[in-house]
Every structure is written in C-alpha cells, then in structure tokens.
Image (cartoon, rainbow, N blue to C red):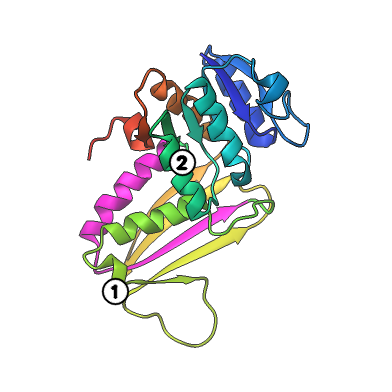
Amino acid sequence: MKIVVYGAGVMAQYVKESIINSKNEFVGFVDPLGKGDFVNLKGENSNVEYDAIIDFSHFSLIDDVLEAGIAKKVPVLVATTGHTEEQLKKIEKAAELIPVIKATNTSLGVNIVNEIVAFATKLLKDFDIEIVEKHHNRKIDAPSGTASTLLEIVKENLNDGNDYRTVYGREGYSKRAEKEIGVHAIRGGNIVGEHTVIYAKNDEIIEIKHEALSRKMFSDGAVKAIEFLSGKNAGKYTMRDVLGINK
C-alpha cells in the first residue's frame, strides 16, 4: 500500500519509519510550510499516486486532507485533535464517500485501556473519579485528546453521567462535590504521554494507568489502522474496529 503522510513533524517521522517497517510504501510528507515533499496534493501534485492517507498534521488542514482522500477515493486516518464542530461534521460527511477513522489516540494499548475504563466505571460508579494526564512541555492542547476521550467514556458509563460536572484543575477552598469529575493536565520535560484514571472511596484507591515510553506506539498503531481501512467500504470506523472489539 502506498501511504502519504500529512505533517512533517516528529510524529510524522515516526509514521514514516512504521510504514517502511510494515513493508508498505512511504510516498512522502505533505506540509504547507514547505518542510515536506509536497506543499499539498493539488495542481501539479494531483498526479501523485497513493492508496491511503495518515494525518498527523494540524486540525486546520482537515479540509485539504479530506479533499485529497476523496479525490483518489482512498481511506483516511485522522490522528489530529482540536477540530471544531464544523470540521467534525465535514469528517462525518467525508465518511459517506470514503472509509475514515478519526482517532484521538492511535496506540492499541490506550484503546484497550478505554475498554477497561468503560467496564471499571460501571462497577465503581460510587467512587470519586479523577483523570490525570502528563505530557512534554511542547504540547499545546490541554487536556489531551486522550484524556477528553477518557472523560467521555467515564460519563457514558455512569448511570447519570450527564449530571456530573467536570472540573479542570483545582484551586480555592471549596471541597470536592459529589457529582464531579476532575481532569488535570501536567506539562514537563520530554514526557511522551501518561494517562491515569483514579477511582477513590473511603480507604481504597484503584488506578488504571497507561504510560507511553516512545512515540513509536502511536505510529505503529496508525499503520495498523490504515491497513485495516484498506479495501473497506465508505464509512466512519474506530480504533475499536481495528482491535476487533464489537459493541
């Protein structure tokens, strides 16, 4: 499979390595700032041959990414976060024409942790629940997309999840409310990524934690995901589909 990568940063370099190691063909990086092999896939670059797109660029480029996928009728993995509601609707619309995965985290392990958290929350719904994520000091969004996904999963698996208030960080002198979920973001050094869901009640604490030791796990998972999409009909798929987890 010939794969083009949107983005030319650190993660894109890892994706290139994972593509080559998986015996697929790396076509090139697409970067509007001129740091890649192509500025875009339009005009004189419209004849570039590719069978799939992996997007590790920036949410602002989603229109270009989707247009390139639709133009060639190839699968697209969107691994960026921070999209607006309008952009998310465009992704949904594109999935009517081509196979698409929109993933906040392409690590296979993290997506398994999502399943564990869903199950654990149903059993521990009477516990206080807090989410803590840690990343390197260059990460610009907080909380991380993965932490936001964990928050969604927790709320979905509480009997009255919509009634819970989300508190981002804490300050002041008020005590923790009963129906409250805390989300905390830590930034420092070169932390690749760490996510912990804490369940606490009375004299016991249960923690579900995932720690990334290398960005390679994200790139390997991204390649697994795009391989899964190869040959699929148009539609919006998830990392759950890649893992073979049925609802």
Can you identify the residue that label 1 sits on?
202
Badge 2 local density, few (<14 within 10 Å), some, or many (20+)?
many
Badge 2 element:
helix
Q: Position of residue 34 (x, y in %)?
A: 78, 32
**Vertical side of 234 occupied by 133: above or below:** below
Q: Residue 107: give x, y in percent of width and height.
A: 46, 37
Q: Quadrant of the C terminus?
A: top left
Q: Give amino acid for label 2.
A: Ile
Report the magenta residues as a range.
108-135
Quarter of the rendering containing residue 214: top right
Q: Earlier in the sequence, mark 1 or mark 2?
A: 2
Query: x and y percent of residue 119 in the render?
Result: 25, 51
Question: On residue 245, which mark appears?
Answer: none
Circle number at residue 91: 2
Amino acid residing under circle 1: Asn
Give the quarter of the image for residue 44: top right
Disc number lying in front (1 or 2): 2
- For the point 77% across and 31% down, the residue is 35
Q: Is residue 195 magenta?
A: no
> Magenta segment: does it hold 109?
yes
Badge 1 crowding class, 10 Å Cα cut-off, few under 14, some 14 to 19, many 20 or more, is few
Residue 4 versus residue 170: which sits nearer the camera?
A: 4
Q: Is residue 88 above or below residue 143?
A: above
Tell me if I can see residue 203 in this picture.
no
Q: What is the secondary structure assignment of the residue under circle 1?
A: loop
Q: Position of residue 134 (x, y in %)?
A: 56, 55
Closer to the camera in the image, 142 or 63: 63
State the residue at coordinates (61%, 17%). Answer: 26
Q: Residue at x 55, y 42 (%)?
A: 80
Q: Quadrant of residue 68?
A: top right
Residue at the bottom extreme, as displayed: 173
